[in-house]
Amino acid sequence: MRMMMKARMDTQMSNQVTKGGAMPDSVKAAIERLKPEAAYFTPEGGRSMILVFDMQDSSELPSIADPFFQEMGAEVTFEPVMNLDELQRGLAALK
């Protein structure tokens, strides 16, 4: 299932990670692990990352979210999302 994950990092913890030079490695590790179809970075509410990726099973949630909790004190949310083709298939099923 296509998921959108938003990770909003705690400012103090992410400051330490950034000043210590580990932020690029943390971001790279997340990208390599999840292989997102889209990755966005924004100052929304502080340092934030939005990744859109395919999740095979909900049992993946802990292993995806935990590095963000531990390394950056992040608030992490997940939402199922659709692209246009998927929306059109869903709407066609309503007929």
Image: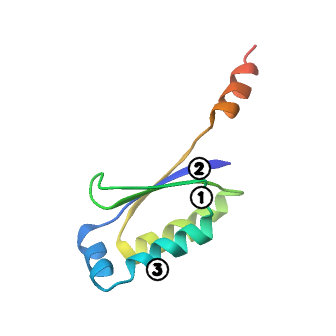
Whole-percent x, y for residue 30 in the image: 53, 70
SS at circle 3: helix
Cα distance between the residues tagged 3 and 2: 23 Å
Q: Name the residue under label 2.
A: 3
Q: Which residue is drawn at 42% across and 71% down?
A: 69
Q: Name the residue under label 3.
A: 25
Q: Which residue is drawn at 64% across and 31% down?
A: 84
Which quadrant of the figure has residue 93? Answer: top right
Q: Which numbered mark, 1 or 2, is in the foreground of this view? A: 1
Count of labels shown?
A: 3
Q: Mark 1 points at which residue?
A: 36
| Mark 2 burial class by Cα count in 10 Å: few <14, some 14-19, many 20+ | some
Q: Which residue lies furthest to the bottom in this view?
A: 20
SS at circle 2: strand
Instruction: Say if 41 sits above or below 25 in the image.
Output: above
Whole-percent x, y for residue 19 in the image: 27, 82
